[in-house]
Image: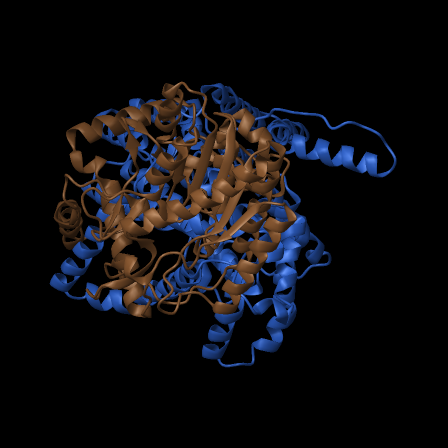
Chain colours: A brown, B blue
Amino acid sequence: MKNNINNHKKLSTIIGLIVGIILLYVFLPNKNVKLNLEDFALDENTKTYRASIENKKIHCSDLKDISSCIKGYKAENKNYPVVVWLGNSQLHAINQYKKGDNTAALHIHKYLKGLNFYSLTFSQPNANLQEHYLLFAYLLDQFKINTLILPIVFDDLREDQIRSNIISILNYQNSFKRIEKSLSGKRIISKNNQKDLAGNEINIIEDTIQNNFENFIDDKLGNIWPLWMQRDSLIGQLYGNLYLLRNSIFGIKATTTRKIIKGRYANNINALKDILSLAIENEVNVIVYIPPIRNDIKIPYNISQYVNFKHEISEITKHYETNFANLENLIPAKLWGKKASTSLKKEEEVDFMHFQAEGHNLLAKAIFLEFKKILKLSE
Amino acid sequence: MIFNSLTYLLLLIVVVSLYWLLPYRARLSLIFFSSLIFYGFWKIKFIPVLLISVIVDWIVSQKMQIVHKKRKSKLLLISLVTNIGLLFYFKYLIFFAENSIGLINFFGGNIDSITFKIILPLGISFYTFQTISYTLDVYRGFIKPEKDFILFACYVTFFPQLVAGPILRAKEVIPQFNNRPTFSINFIYIGMRLILFGLFLKVVLADNLSILVDTGFAINVENMSAIDVWTLAFLFGFQIYFDFSGYSFIALGSARMLGIIFPNNFNFPYIASSPKEFWRRWHISLSSWIRDYLYLPLNNIKVLNRSEGGLERVVKTKGSKKSLFTTMGIMGLWHGANWTFLIWGLYHAAIISIYRITQPKISKFPNWFKTLAGISLTLPIMMLSWIPFRASSLSDAFSMWSKLFNPFKYTWLGMRENTYLITFLVLIGFFLVYLFKEKVSPIINSSKYISLIFDSIFIMILTSLVIIFFRAINQFIYFQF
């Protein structure tokens, strides 16, 4: 048990501590740009746009801004039946964005308004069906939903994480009750339960003196040392560079084939079934659709898995007597675009997920057509 | 209070500054009261539980000195009943009640389950073991009871080791408090380096791995492949190692800043070439405690009485296997009131037993082969032990293990590709760091300037990463035990 440390180690400790802090300033991204980790995969070619009409938001993300969409609807004060469109970044990203471009969410809102319906869109990057399930359960308590529009994105069935702004829906008693007995609800609850390995409450500092004091010092430190508050941007930059490095080493591109991940796929399919059951229970019409994908080049999926997937979705919708549309070939090749390189090489890559503004228009028209079919049926 | 928080760092700065300015008596009072503040920042209401343990053991040990042997045993019993009673009430009562009701109902009874709301006081398993060791040492005559209550209280409640160890012996700590260390800047430098390294292990490595581990273990077991089970075993093995050794380094560093030297609690456990060696490198203070207060006494063998060495002795007495399984089973249950922990302990007992049987046959091989083959076998076997430790139920643990023996379960991947990649990188990184420390570091240290450059870069990287990832969100895994 030595207590010796030579002068070099002392000196290197001081140098290391000082240079380590300076290094953070060197690598700190532009202080005015707030890095959005969720939209990391989007780039300068693809702009995120969530529309508002007459200062009323009609396109939101999740619990962090959901209240502005709900407020907008309530401010309308006309008790329109609501059409909810859930989806991933395809709904809020416009490729090769030009000023004045709009998303499908805005177009559909206008089309439906003409029929005295009010549409609200909620989309998050790489959103999975378990997240849609929670969001749908939550929205059922906010207003009377007439129709749910639900894209089933093959890529997103590889996702399993539920972001914090959606998992907190479990804190709402009504939403919790809606899902607690379903297969995926049980799974989501147990996965996110607040117990540790030994069965104790997991967040030991919540509601403690330490928690309050920690928040207090954290704020104070942020005030006197701005870098402290910008650490999320640094983490984003670090992860971003690691992502590019990984892709460069393994030659991963947007065109690289993604296989399904068995467990995650099953969890998301179960969530789809639970969404459809919940919709039936609450007399909500559902339009399930296979979203457009760029089809003039080889798609980045295992073809047989993708074919099976489409067949399975079609069968599920038949079982639940739900409307189904395959829109995979809806958008012509010219309306798709490029995205920035996903590796350290600077060459542009094909974007399979996000299309240009005209594509959004086509998608809105196609969905509107499906909606009108439902109206006809119900008449 | 958790170590990876600004609150703790602030407390440490204040306590270290005052400590070296104050005279001796005041220093002890400072440590005692700052330890209570440290503990009370979590939940004040559990301070009396901690103090009960301290006061009872202090009184009992004082009395032991003045009574004859027969009464000594009674006093020991009072201490054991108090400490184990507290532990049983807070940690095992619900488990015991649930299982008893289950058993009664299984045999035809009809009892409704009882709902208890008992919160486990932080660190109770650690400080009760520490006080038990003290009373037993006094009983055995290894140490004289400490007359100074504050000094004794400092030994039990000393904040760097209060909530998650290391579980130290009185003879290792009390004399250090007594010796009144004089200030040396070395204490601060070494302490800072240890804390920085501990924070790196916790906030950069363990907390980032925890995201992958939590996601992985949340998969339905039926959808997991055998490759997933292996990956998760390794991944959690590294997470818990970084987490707990990170905590231990911060504890060592904090104590060092106050002039108190703790022995190492971890020493590259996954480099072990046998299960025996693993327990000399993993949670050394606990395995040494188990050795001295359970395993050796059960075999009627003289104890070693130090918090180092782990389960190093091979005992070949009649009934040693039984005592090994009992000891390891208790060690498993010490971690938590769940059958999964018991299985974890028994798994280790079984592995040690198999090793003891095969050891004579292996000894004729050359050393290099024994080491290489030993590491290659011990590492995966030890990693697989983490499956019941982390799985949410016994059936999940057995289902996961069973997949390993089914060749058809090796045909798919159930997690994101990154998970396998990161596990592989961590595994390679672990061995590279070990080789660097053993082979390259001595060469670098032989040259002043190269050493200065390398060490500065090392501290620089650690500092940057710790600042970026420092969050008081994730508790240490061992806080729950």
Task: From this view, report whether residue A18 is shown above or below residue A290.
Answer: above
Q: Is residue B297 visible?
A: no
Which image quarter is the C terminus of chain A in?
top right
Say which residue appears at 46% left-offset and 34% top-offset: A83
Q: Residue B202: x percent and y percent? A: 36, 46
Say which residue appears at 30% left-offset and 38% top-offset: A50
Q: Is residue B466 visible?
A: yes
Residue A59 figure quarter: top left
* A291 or A232, nearer to the observer: A291
Q: How many marks?
A: 0
Residue B441 figure quarter: bottom left
Task: From this view, report whether residue A309 is shown above or below residue B24.
Answer: below
Q: Residue B197: x percent and y percent? A: 30, 49
Q: Is residue B287 left or right of residue A220?
A: right
* B137 or B423, nearer to the observer: B423
Q: Is residue B192 left or right of residue B313?
A: left
Task: From this view, report whether residue B371 is shown above or below residue B307.
Answer: below
Task: From this view, report whether residue B24 is shown above or below residue A272.
Answer: above
Residue A228 figure quarter: top left
* B149 or B324, nearer to the observer: B324
Q: Residue A369: x percent and y percent? A: 45, 45
The residue at the far right in this view is B108
Say which residue appears at 43% left-offset and 32% top-offset: A115
Q: Is residue B101 left or right of residue A255?
A: right
Q: Residue A351: x percent and y percent? A: 31, 59
